[in-house]
Every structure is written in C-alpha cells, then in structure tokens.
Image (cartoon, rainbow, N blue to C red):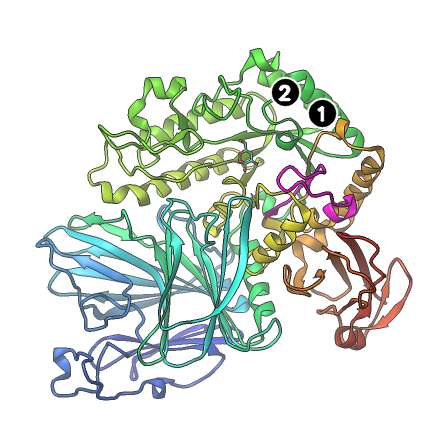
Amino acid sequence: MPISYDHERGLFTIDTDRSTYQMMVDGYGYLMHLYYGAKSSGSMDWLLSFVDRGLSANPYDAGTDRTYSLDFLPQEFPVQGTGDHRSPMLILRDSNGTFGCDLRFRRYEIQKGKYALKGLPAVYADAPDDAETLRIVLGNDRTGVEVELLYGVLPHLDIITRSSVITNGGKGRITVEKLGSACLDFVAGDFDVITFHGRHTLEMQKERMRTPHGTLMLGSRRGYSSHQYNPFFILADHGTTETAGRCWSMQFVYSGGFRAEIEHDQYDQTRIQMGMADEKFSYPLDPGESLTAPEVIMSFSRNGLQDLSHDLHKCIREHVCRGKYRDVPRTVIINSWEACYFRFTGDKLLDLAQKAKDLGMEMLVLDDGWFGDRRDDYRALGDWYANEEKLGMTLGELVKGVNDIGLKFGIWIEPEMISEDSDLYREHPDWAMAIPNDKPVLGRNQLVLDFSRKEVVDTIYEQICAVLDQGNIEYMKWDCNRSINDVYSYTASDQGKVMYDYVLGLYDMLGRLNDRYPDMLIEGCSGGGGRFDCGMLYYTPQIWASDNSDAIDRLVIQYGLSYGYPACTVGAHVSACPNHQTGRVTPIMTRTIVALSGTFGYELDPDKIPEEEKQGIRKGIDLYKKYERLVHNGLYYRLSDAGTDRYTAWEFASEDGTEALVLMVVPENHGNAPTIYVTPRGLTSGAEYKDEETGTVYSADALMDAGFPTPVVDDDRESFMFHLVRL
Ligand code: GLA
C-alpha cells in the first residue's frame, strides 16, 4: 500500500517506487511536513530541530516551551496567523474581517484510486489499483472552517499530486484571500531553482539560479498561465545534473493566473509553494460553501533531471491527456496561417489542400479569418458564422471539397474573445469584461468574454457546435490571444470570484466539447505557448508551442518544454524561409527534425517554395511517419544544453532499448571546429547498436560512455539524424 498511517506516532507516509513523503500530526495537532526524498522507511521525526530562537513566536498551547515555534518548523499546510511569518498557503478572513485561522488535525481517510476535483482538471488513473488517495481534514473551532488536504499517488511514476478543499462549516461568511495548492518545507539544503520564463514568440527559456535569501516569486497576473512564466518549476541540489543529484518539481494543473514562491529563510530553510494568483482574488464563502484549489503535480528524482522529466512525461501523456488522441498518431497538418494569413478564398484553400495532398499532408487547418467580417484582427470575434462571401461557398461545401481532395479538415476558433466591432458585442455589450463607466483595456483590439457567466458559455458553446456541425470537422485550434485586465462581471455576487469562476467556465465548455465530439482533436493555443499547462492538456492533448516557427529558436523553446512536458503535447510545424518571425534561413531538413520532435505539420504555401524543398517535405513526412511512435512514446533525453552548448542534441529511445533516434543541430558553424561527440543514453548495456545509415556497429556501453563522432559540419544550422538499432 503506497499510503499508510501510523496511529501511535501520528505518521502519514506516502511511498512511490523511488520516493517517500512523510508528515506527522504532532502533540498539538499541527501537521508537520517531515520528508520528501529518496525512498526511506521508519519515522523521520528526527529531522525536526527544536531550538529556543529569539523573536520566533510560540503557540499558546506550548506553554513555557520556547523551542516550539511554527516560525521555523516545517509544515504541511502553513496558515497565516499561527506565528509562522513565512509565506502561507491560506489567508482567511472571518465575518468580522479578522485575519487568521489556526488549523489542527481532525480526521483522515485512505482510498483506492485517484481523487477527482469538481469542475477542475486533475490527474486520473484508469484502474483504481494504479493510484491511491489520502484525505486529511484540518479544522478550526472559532470559524468552523475545515480544509481537506488531498494527496494522490501514482506509485510507479513517482508522482504525488496535491490539492485542497476549504469549506465554511461556520455560521458567518468567510473570505479566502489566498489559497495555495502545494507547499514543501525543506529544513536544510543548498538549492538551485530552475524556471521557464519567456515572452510571446520566445517562450520556455530555462533559467537556473541559486535560491537567494528572501522570496523568489514567479507567476501570472494575466488570467491565463502566460508566456512570461510557465506554471512549472524545479528545485534541485546545487550540483544536480541530468543524471545525478536530487530534484523536485511542481507543475500546475490550472490555466488561470498562478503564483509560485521559493522562499529561503533566516535559518537557511527553504519553502516552495504553488497556487492560484492571489491578486484580484478574494473568494467569499457562505456557510456550507466550499472552494477547491487546483491540483499541483509533484515529482522527485534522486538521479537527476532526466528521470524527473521521464516521470512527468509519462504522467502527463497517460494520466493528464485524455481521449482518442492520447494514444493515436496525429495527422500531418497544413495550417493556413503562415501560408496566407487573412488573404484567402475558398478556391485558394482548395488549391492549398490539393498541393498539400500532393506533398503527402493529411489535414488542412483553416486558421483565423473565415468568419463574420474578419478581414483583419480588428473585428468580428464572437461572430462565429462563416463569411460565405469571402469564401465563395458555404463552410460545409469547403469542408466537403477538402475531404474530396483526400484531406481531413480542421478549424481555428477563439471562443473566449469578443471584438467591439462584432454583432455579438452590439447585441450583448455586457458580456465583455469591462469596468462600468470606464474604458476597457484592449489587447489585439479585442475584449475578453465573461466566461464566469453560464449563459455566456452556453451561447458560445451553441454557436461553436453550430459551426462544427456543418461538416466533417476533425480538429479545432482553440486560441486565446489576450490577457484579462478588467475584472468585472455584471452578474457576479462578488468580483473577487470572477478570475477563478472564469477558468471553471473555460473548463466547462472544453469538457462539453470533448464529450460531444470525442473524435475531434482540439489543439490548445494562446498566441502560441501562452497557455501551455496541464490544465489545458486535460482537454487539448497538444498545444501550439509558440508563434515562433523558426527552427533555431524552437530548439530552445522545445528544450525548455522537455523538462516538464512530453513531445506528444508540443505543437510544431515546418514553415517557409526566410522565417516570418526571425528572417532566418534554415535548411529544410533542420526545420523538419525540429518539428517532428513534436506534433508535426506545415505552415507554408507550397506555391512559394523551391522544388528541392518540396522534395524535403516528402522526405520529412516519411521520416515523421517512421518515427512518430518513437517520438510519442519514447523516453526523451537531453544530450546538450540548448542555447548554451555549440550544438543541440536530443534523443528519443524506446523503453525496451531496441532503438534510439539521436537528433542534432549546429546553430552556428566555426572555422576548424573540434569534432562534436554525442553521447546517447538509455541504450541496453551489454548490447550492440548499428547506425542504420552508415552501418557502423557500436557497443552500447562505450557509446554511452565516450560518445560517437559526428560528421564535419559544413554550414550554419546544419542538422544530423542517427537511428541506432539494437542488434
Ligand atoms: C495566434 C495564434 C496563431 C494564429 C493567430 C491567428 O497568434 O497563435 O497561430 O492562429 O493567432 O490570428
């Protein structure tokens, strides 16, 4: 049993195959965090150190014992107002406006299977035996508040999830000012934190820094998880590498604003936590009402970052992504955006479809510009009916035409948005989020629909179903191209609820679309990777990783994503050169191997590319087909530090060790450069491998030790591909 409770010592222990997590109810009823690390046994209560420290407050119950203080003891769910002056998980005000809530242990329950969360996405387990759930209830007598702490464990993947539900069991209204989802207290350690920051068209830039004294805060106040910081970070021992050393991660299963904190305190202790953004959030609960914190996925590895990523990849691929497309190969897309932007007719699209078909592509995705009066990005969001005048045909005729050519059909929609210049806005101005009697903040000249209102979600849902029902539409790109600035809902009982309820509305609609169109693949998108998170992946098993389709920039973006997300979730296309975002010219094969390391497709006009690139496309599609399963299901290895090293190399190896695909790009060539040796990992020790192209036979152990020499590099941005097959 992965979860156990030792009544005598008050010890809760969660074991995974390679880690142990332990907490303890102490003599005062506080829930102490004891340990999260390498698999261990027995009580770890000896980790607690009790010292009389000046100016660290003591709970009244401790009497004259000045060595007991929540100011420095490690806690499982730290709450404001208990003498702990580090950053809390919960800030609560009672009906008098008084802060503070002293929570003590009340009861617990252990169940088979993985808990689910009301209205929110969460890790799931198909078979009850694959997971276990622990519920620990803490309570406060003065306010009547109860907090249920939820722990889910997938023991074979070394994954522990956390969430909590706060319930007002008292008589007056309470207000939740901050509710975190997961917290870890480390009593000692010299840590680095690894974060992933970025911007539109350059997401997921990895940064590693030593934790400073004070609090390092990252997050999003934008109402969506954001390009600026991904809701994922890693804490690692200072010396941790890809293959050695301890590391822990937190990853949010939520698509709204978030807050992650890494706090290094006065006694060199470290607290990390993750939860919803607490700005513009103030959630009142009347007696009997509850609020659920979104889930955090945690993992631990004692063998470096590689194992941590492998566990996270499997967890997300098999226990977050759902539906048919979790498992089946994705089709090769041609997307109309970089091919023609807003400039197309139905005939032009049919021509694009025919040319794409001739090159071996499988689905035409009609991007922005097909609806209402959408001539440019200044208008028409919300008018989800096809512009038949522009198309010169109905949407149904276009879909049929594309299908007749032999391609599937997909469509772009931005359901959460509304343009002031739209019929929808003229009819329902109050559906847009804007502060009454004030001018709204515009983003891409559009406003955000109030998805915290059910009637808004219902109407947009009906409109979108009406579009999807016009033909055999097998894919939808769900975009979201601005942040939420003006938090105001005309119907909300309290504006402090809107940011959270908005995200529930988003999930409600996505869930309904999943149920109604189980064969339709939804790709998430938010100006590229602005909402690349596990909350979206629960509904949309792939996400367009960046509006930057330049292969060289993508090396670093996709490398950043690889720490937390499997390749099968990473939307990646080959686009035309010079690249539309960077002006860079890159060989077609380099563009191909970068894109086939994600969900593959094209974003170009075949009429405008040279003949030899067309050959490259045919070859690229064959390569994608050949390696798609290996990329989707294989173990991913980072073989160099993208953006820092002279070359970027990565590998997909089958779990059984029968084959490995090693890919390498040299962004910049130099005169008389040293030979690059690439050292693969994950091969079967004792076995021999053959390079499929050259026929060279290698011993796996020497290969994983010394590496193999790669060919002389002739040009900037050259790439290489090595398929190693076990003999
Ligand atoms: C966003 C997306 C792009 C494209 C445009 C269309 O920027 O990320 O891929 O769909 O919108 O307006």
**What residue span does the magenta drawing correspond to?**
570-591
600 lies above or below 477: below
Count of marks overlaid on the render: 2
Say which amino acid is labelled 1. Leu
Q: Residue at 11% of width from left, 54% of height from top?
A: 97
Residue 115 visible in the shown view: no
Q: Position of residue 488 (x, y in %)?
A: 26, 36
To which residue does mark 1 refer?
A: 352
Do the CB atoms of the residues marked 1 and 2 lie less than 8 Å apart?
yes
Give the quadrant of ligand 1.
top right
Q: Position of residue 522 (x, y in %)?
A: 55, 38
Instruction: Say if disc 2 is inside 8 Å of ligand 1.
Output: no
Say which amino acid is labelled 2. Phe
Q: Is residue 584 left or right of residue 5?
A: right
Q: Which mark is residue 546?
A: none
Quadrant where the N terminus lies? bottom left
To which residue does mark 2 refer?
A: 344
- For this orientation, the residue located farthest to the right is 695
